[in-house]
Amino acid sequence: MENQIFLDKDADLGVLENKRVAIIGYGIQGRPQALCMRDSGVDLLIGIGSPDRPSWAAAVEDGFEPVSISEATAQADLTYILLADPPQPEIYYESIHNNLKPNSTLAFCHGFNVLYGAITPPDNVNVVLFVPNGPGHTVRQKYLDGSGIYGAISVEQDVTGNAVDMVLALAKSVGSLRVGSVGVTFQQETEGDNFEEQVLYGGVIHLMKATFDTMVAGGYPPHFAYAKAIRSLRTVVDVMDDIGIEEYISRRSSRTCEFAVRTSGPRVVNYEEVQNIFDETERGEFAANWMHEWALGMPRLHRMRRTGADSQMEQTGREWRDQFGEG
Ligand SMILES: NC(=O)c1ccc[n+]([C@@H]2O[C@H](COP(=O)([O-])OP(=O)(O)OC[C@H]3O[C@@H](n4cnc5c(N)ncnc54)[C@H](OP(=O)(O)O)[C@@H]3O)[C@@H](O)[C@H]2O)c1
């Protein structure tokens, strides 16, 4: 299945008929995916840590009757783990591992804990992965619009012979086969995701900050610099995705913009560092650093969050939103 792209026609929701799916965790991804699955006719049970957790109230508000994680797992033919990644191993061994029904399917939304050995599922269950490549609220919005978010699927362990059918049905029920989902390995999904987050999200966010800081230091009004640093990008990314980068640069942007992009753009990207980050990710160094940071209670992240929230760029953004809304 690797490298193949799957569409609605390749999947049959019938494999989930008379089957119960446990959604474990009801947060950024769990809630929207569960709502899509319910609309697709899947029989769901929501498993949440305890009634005093915020997710419990959210599930009740949506008309579910949540139960404990162990109870949901014990009743499920497919257990889909949508807990935040760092606490997953502890919760998994406490409430899931020993309650999985033999020949049932265990699904993840990110391969991190399985790939790096923090979770080792038993030999008698299917182990699969489905991840829609976008934030949860967009997954839900696209589903309601009749579309979906393209996704990635993977099968790590197939004990029943139909693990591929199960994960395809899962992806279909969330709308991700309306626009295509690609088959990958757990390793590709995990390391590809970690690489993208470091290079693309990390790089673009820091490029926005550098644009803003340099312009303000050079005497530009902060609001003008803010518009240049964030808002202008927002307007063109969708266009590039819709018509292609080359078409955008050579036909939709100005000739001055085309000249700037083609001549100065490559000076900004350090390809050697991009490759270094790729290699570090493949060697598991990023994962080890992150697990260490998490185990210590995220001291570096807490410190960086404080500095980030106090920055002039954030302050300018807040002022702008207060005065003019988000448009
Ligand atoms: N966020 C994304 O856009 C995104 C995109 C692709 C894939 N994923 C993957 O989707 C999965 C879920 O991520 P998420 O972002 O949806 O996570 P999340 O919203 O941060 O948390 C999901 C659930 O984990 C529960 N939880 C957290 N700590 C817990 C604890 N100590 N005990 C019991 N429950 C706990 C939360 O419960 P409470 O609400 O009650 O605290 C919530 O129901 C992850 O594997 C992630 O990699 C996420």
Image: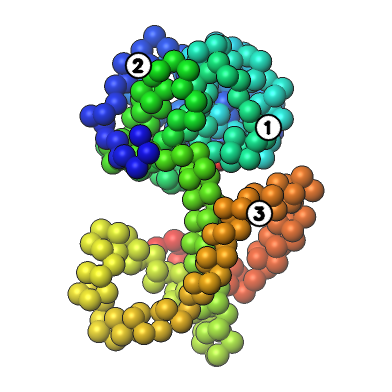
Q: How is the image coloured?
A: rainbow
Kind of element beneath mark 3: helix
Q: Position of residue 88 (x, y in %)?
A: 65, 33
Q: Position of residue 187 (x, y in %)?
A: 52, 43
Most foreground residue, 15 or 173: 15
Mark 1 residue element: helix
Q: Nearer the viewer, residue 269 or 173?
A: 269
Depth check, front residue: 69 or 195: 195
Specify the amino acid type for callout 3.
Answer: Glu
Q: In whole angstroms, how far apart are the C-alphas of marks 1 and 3?
A: 19 Å
Residue 108 visible at all: yes
Give the residue at x 29% y 36%: 6
Q: Which residue is mark 3?
A: 285
Q: CA distance from mark 1 to mark 2?
A: 29 Å
| Mark 2 crowdedness (10 Å alpha carbons): few <14, some 14-19, many ≥20 | some
Say which residue label 1 marks.
89
Q: Quadrant of the N terminus?
A: top left
Q: Residue at x 55, y 77 (%)?
A: 210
The residue tagged 2 is: 15
Amino acid residing under circle 2: Val
Tell which circle, 1 or 2, labels the residue nearer the N-terminal end. 2
Q: Earlier in the sequence, mark 2 or mark 3?
A: 2
Label 3 Cα crowd, 10 Å radius (few <14 / some 14-19 / many 20+):
few
- Say above or below: 82 vs 212: above
Task: Residue type at mark 1: give it.
Answer: Pro
Give the vertical position of 66 relative to 29 (above or below). above
Q: Quadrant of residue 118?
A: top right
Quadrant location, ligand no. 1? top right
Is residue 45 visible to the viewer in this orientation of the structure? no
- Residue drawn at 42 percent across, 22 percent down: 163
Relative image position of residue 157 (x, y in whole percent): 49, 25
